[in-house]
Image (spheres, coloured by chain):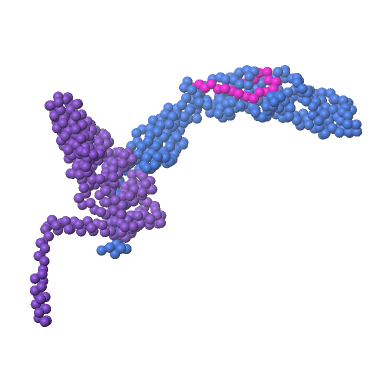
C-alpha cells in the first residue's frame, strides 16, 4: 500500500490558480493572506473508500486536512508553500493507511494586481507641472521586496524602485503618459514572481490658459470669437438660451470638438443667451470656462416690420366677408 | 258741428301751446354730439373682432396655435369690443418678436386686447422705447414694469403720459450736452414720466423748464445728473412744487443765511409739502377716452 501510494504521487497534478482574488474578497478573520485555489489529482487506489489530504504550510501555522471520496481535490487555501501528503481509507475496514511521502506544492500568488493609479487614470499636474503619484499594488505572499518600474516613452529608461511595502509615492512630470509594472522577490531563494500587467496613466500638464471671449456684436449675432489658448487641441463651446420671461437656460447649440477660435452660428433670434468656451488638450488639464451672457434684441425697424406684417395680414382678411357689418 | 270741430282743431294748438323751446346752442349741440359719439363707442361689432382674430391666427406663420386654441383666443378677444383684434395682434407680435415665450406673449396680448386703445398704445410705445437698444435699452423686466405703470396702472390721461414719455426719450436721445449714458438718462426720465398724471398739461414742459433753471441759474448751477435727481424730487410733489422750491431756496439764501447746500435741502423739504395726502391729486383726465376695449357683455 505504501509503495503503491508513493507511485501514485508521481502522477499527482497540481494546478495552481494563477492570480489572487481581488482585494476585499480575500480577507478572512483568521488569515488575511490572499487565498489560492489548488486543484489536486492523484491516481486512485484500488479498494479505497476515500482519501485524506494534508497540507503543511512552510511558513508555520496549523496543518490543513481535507477529506475526499474521489482521487481529486479542489480547495481554496491561504497563499503559501505547502508540504503535501495523502493517505487512503480502506473500504472494508474504514481505516486510513499510512501517509505517502510528501511533495512541495507552491500555492503562493504568482501575479500582482496594480491598484493605483487606476488603469488609464488621468491625473492633473500642479502649477509647476509635477504630480505626486501614489502607486499601490496587491501584496504577494512571501514577497521579500517589490520592484516598481515606471517609464514614459522608453521602457529601457524606466525608473526602478525597491520597497518591502505595497505602495510607493513619488513625483512625476506632467504632460506625459506613463506605464508601470511591479514584480517581487520571494523570501525564498526561488523567485516565483511573474511580472504584473503593465498599467498606464496620464499626468496632464498645468491647466490651459482660459480662452477669453470677445465682445458680442449686437444686434445680429452670427459668430463668437475668443483668444487663442496655447497648447489647446480643441475648444468646447456651449450656447444656451432662454426666453426673456423665463430663467432656466436650455441648450441651444454645442460644439464639443471645435478646432478654431471663431464659432459661426446662424443669426440668433431675440432672447437671452449664455455662451461658454473652454480649451482642452489630451496632455494638459482643461482651462477654466469663459462665458458671456447677453440679450439679443430686435431693432426698431425689425419690430416695426413684424408689426406691419401682422396688421397687413389682418387688413387682408376683412371680417366683412363673413359679417353683415354696415 | 263738423265746422266747429275744424275750427277748434285749428285754434287749439295755438291757444294751448307751450312756449316754444329755444334753439340749442352750439355748445349744447357739441356736447350732445360728444355724448352720442361716446355712447356709440360703447357699441361693439363683436363678430367682426372674433372673425378677424380667428382668421389672423389661422393665417399667421409666426404662431402655431391649434384650431381649438385659436377659437378660444378669438372668443376672448371679441369681448374687447372694436379694435380688439389689432390691439391683441400688435402686442402678441411685439412680445414674441422681442423674445418672450408664446405663452407669455399670448397672456399679455389678451390682457391688452381688453384695454382701451390709448392704454394699449401706451404699453406698446413705452415698452418699445424703454426696451430697445436704440432707446433706453433697459432689461426686459424693467422695461415691462415701466410700460405697465404707464399704461394699465396709469391713472391719468394715457395719451398725455405717452406724449410726455416720448418727449423725455427724445430729450435724452437728442440733447448732446447731457453727456449721460442713454440708459442712465432713461432711468431718470422713466421716473419723471410717472409724475405726468399730476400735471394738467403733462410733466414734460415743467421738467424742461425746471431742468434748465437748475442748470443755468447762477446761484444753483447744478450738474446734469444732480439736476435730474433734484428735478424728479421736486416734480413728484405736484405742480406747485417747483414754485415752492425756488421760493424756499431764495428765501433761505437771503433771509436765513443758508449756504447753497442747505438752501437746496430746505427748498426740497418745502417742495415736498406741496400737496396734502399721500400723493398729489391727479390732474389729468382723458378728454375723449374711447371706451372700446372695455369688456363687452359676456
Q: Quadrant of the C terminus of chain B?
A: bottom left
A134 is higher (above) or lower (below) than B22: above
B145 is higher (above) or lower (below) than A284: below
Chain drawn purple in the picture: B
Left or right, A228 with respect to A308, comes to: right
Q: Is residue B257 visible?
A: yes
Palette colour of chain A: blue
Residue A11 is covered by the magenta coloring: no
State whether the magenta stretch is mostly helix, strand or loop: strand
Q: Residue at x 82, y 25 (%)?
A: A85
Q: Quadrant of the N terminus of chain B?
A: bottom left
Which range of residues does the magenta coloring cover?
A129-148
Q: Residue at x 10, y 69 (%)?
A: B16
User: Where residue B243 sits: x, y (%)?
Assistant: 15, 35
Q: Nearer the viewer, residue B67 or A38?
A: B67
Left or right, A26 with respect to A54, comes to: left
The extreme bottom residue here reads: B1
User: Where residue B165 sits: x, y (%)?
Assistant: 23, 42
Amino acid at each position: 500500500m505504501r509503495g503503491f501510494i508513493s507511485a501514485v504521487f508521481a502522477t499527482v497534478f497540481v494546478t495552481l490558480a494563477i492570480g489572487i482574488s481581488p482585494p476585499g474578497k480575500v480577507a478572512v478573520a483568521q488569515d488575511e493572506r490572499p487565498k489560492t485555489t489548488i486543484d489536486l489529482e492523484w491516481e486512485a487506489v484500488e479498494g479505497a473508500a476515500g482519501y485524506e489530504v494534508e497540507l503543511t504550510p512552510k511558513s508555520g501555522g496549523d496543518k490543513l486536512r481535507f477529506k475526499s471520496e474521489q482521487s481529486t481535490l479542489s480547495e481554496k487555501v491561504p497563499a503559501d508553500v505547502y508540504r503535501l501528503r495523502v493517505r487512503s481509507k480502506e473500504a472494508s475496514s474504514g481505516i486510513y493507511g499510512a501517509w505517502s511521502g510528501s511533495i512541495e506544492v507552491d500555492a503562493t500568488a504568482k501575479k500582482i494586481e496594480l491598484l493605483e493609479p487606476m488603469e488609464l487614470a488621468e491625473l492633473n499636474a500642479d502649477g509647476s507641472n509635477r504630480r505626486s503619484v501614489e502607486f499601490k499594488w496587491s501584496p504577494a505572499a512571501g514577497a521579500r521586496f517589490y520592484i516598481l518600474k515606471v517609464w514614459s516613452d522608453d521602457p529601457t529608461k524606466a525608473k526602478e524602485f525597491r520597497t518591502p511595502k505595497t505602495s510607493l509615492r513619488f513625483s512625476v512630470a506632467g504632460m506625459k503618459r506613463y506605464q508601470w509594472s511591479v514584480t517581487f522577490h520571494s523570501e525564498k531563494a526561488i523567485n516565483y514572481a511573474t511580472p504584473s500587467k503593465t498599467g498606464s496613466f496620464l499626468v496632464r500638464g498645468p491647466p490651459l490658459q482660459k480662452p477669453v471671449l470677445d465682445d458680442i456684436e449686437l444686434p445680429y449675432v452670427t459668430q463668437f470669437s475668443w483668444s487663442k489658448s496655447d497648447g489647446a487641441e480643441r475648444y468646447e463651446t456651449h450656447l444656451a438660451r432662454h426666453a426673456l420671461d423665463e430663467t432656466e437656460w436650455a441648450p441651444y447649440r454645442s460644439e464639443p470638438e471645435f478646432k478654431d477660435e471663431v464659432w459661426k452660428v446662424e443669426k440668433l433670434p431675440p432672447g437671452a443667451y449664455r455662451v461658454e468656451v473652454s480649451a482642452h488638450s489630451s496632455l494638459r488639464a482643461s482651462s477654466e470656462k469663459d462665458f458671456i451672457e447677453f440679450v439679443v434684441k430686435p431693432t426698431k425697424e425689425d419690430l416695426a416690420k413684424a408689426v406691419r406684417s401682422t396688421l397687413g395680414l389682418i387688413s387682408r382678411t376683412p371680417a366683412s366677408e363673413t359679417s353683415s357689418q354696415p | 258741428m263738423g265746422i266747429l270741430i275744424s275750427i277748434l282743431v285749428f285754434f287749439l294748438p295755438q291757444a294751448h301751446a307751450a312756449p316754444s323751446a329755444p334753439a340749442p346752442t352750439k355748445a349744447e349741440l357739441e356736447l350732445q354730439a360728444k355724448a352720442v359719439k361716446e355712447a356709440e363707442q360703447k357699441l361693439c361689432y363683436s363678430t367682426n373682432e372674433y372673425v378677424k382674430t380667428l382668421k389672423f391666427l389661422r393665417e399667421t406663420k409666426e404662431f402655431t396655435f391649434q384650431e381649438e386654441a385659436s377659437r378660444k383666443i378669438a372668443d376672448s378677444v371679441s369681448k374687447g369690443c372694436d379694435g380688439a383684434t389689432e390691439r391683441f395682434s400688435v402686442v402678441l407680435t411685439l412680445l414674441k418678436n422681442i423674445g418672450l415665450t408664446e405663452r407669455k406673449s399670448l397672456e399679455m396680448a389678451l390682457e391688452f386686447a381688453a384695454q382701451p386703445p390709448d392704454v394699449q398704445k401706451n404699453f406698446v410705445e413705452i415698452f418699445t422705447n424703454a426696451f430697445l437698444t436704440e432707446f433706453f435699452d433697459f432689461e426686459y423686466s424693467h422695461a415691462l414694469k415701466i410700460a405697465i405703470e404707464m399704461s394699465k396702472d396709469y391713472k391719468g390721461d394715457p395719451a398725455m403720459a405717452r406724449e410726455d414719455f416720448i418727449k423725455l426719450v427724445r430729450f435724452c436721445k437728442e440733447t448732446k450736452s447731457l453727456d449721460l449714458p442713454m440708459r442712465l438718462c432713461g432711468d431718470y426720465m422713466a421716473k419723471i414720466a410717472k409724475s405726468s398724471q399730476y400735471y394738467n398739461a403733462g410733466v414734460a414742459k415743467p421738467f424742461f423748464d425746471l431742468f434748465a433753471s437748475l442748470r443755468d441759474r447762477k446761484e444753483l448751477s447744478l450738474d446734469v445728473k444732480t439736476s435730474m435727481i433734484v428735478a424728479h424730487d421736486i416734480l413728484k410733489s405736484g405742480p406747485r412744487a417747483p414754485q415752492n422750491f425756488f421760493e424756499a431756496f431764495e428765501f433761505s439764501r437771503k433771509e436765513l443765511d443758508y449756504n447753497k447746500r442747505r438752501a437746496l435741502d430746505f427748498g426740497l423739504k418745502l417742495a415736498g409739502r406741496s400737496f396734502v395726502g399721500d400723493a398729489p391729486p391727479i390732474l389729468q383726465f382723458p378728454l375723449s377716452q374711447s371706451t372700446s376695449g372695455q369688456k363687452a357683455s359676456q
